[in-house]
Amino acid sequence: MSGCELSREYGIRQTSAWYFKRKVQQGMQSSEQFPLAGRVVVDEFVIGGKEQGNVISN
């Protein structure tokens, strides 16, 4: 799926869609020992800034 298609599908800027796509590609590349096949479902992701109420303290 192209960045333009991702942008339209999720209502985000093309730049954000491109970065998201690139991160997914990097994740897939780093796990070449365990290639993804068929339909891949992402459990959860956030578009935008940090979610309120989900603050992780160190």
Image (cartoon, grey):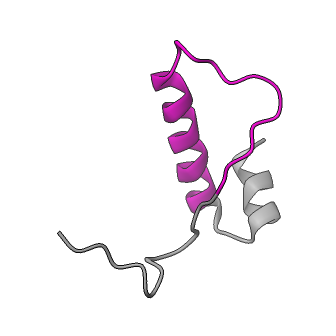
Find the residue positioned furthest to the bottom: 52
Residue at 45% over, 87% down: 52
Residue at 80% over, 53% down: 5
Q: Is residue 53 above or below residue 28?
A: below
Residue 21 magenta-drawn? Answer: yes
Q: Is residue 8 above or below residue 18?
A: below
In front: 29, or 34? 34
- Which quarter of the rendering shows the C terminus? bottom left
Q: How many marks?
A: 0
Locate residue 24, reporting x and y percent: 57, 40
Find the residue positioned furthest to the left: 58
Locate residue 8, reporting x and y percent: 80, 64
Find the residue positioned furthest to the top: 33
Locate residue 30, reporting x and y percent: 45, 24
* Left or right: 7, with 16 as reference point: right
Locate residue 10, reporting x and y percent: 75, 66
Residue at 48% over, 80% down: 51
In front: 27, or 16? 27
Residue at 74% over, 44% down: 41
In front: 35, or 21? 35
User: What's the magenta region?
Assistant: 15-43
* Left or right: 49, with 28 as reference point: left
- Which quarter of the rendering shows the N terminus? top right
Q: Is residue 48 above or below residue 29?
A: below
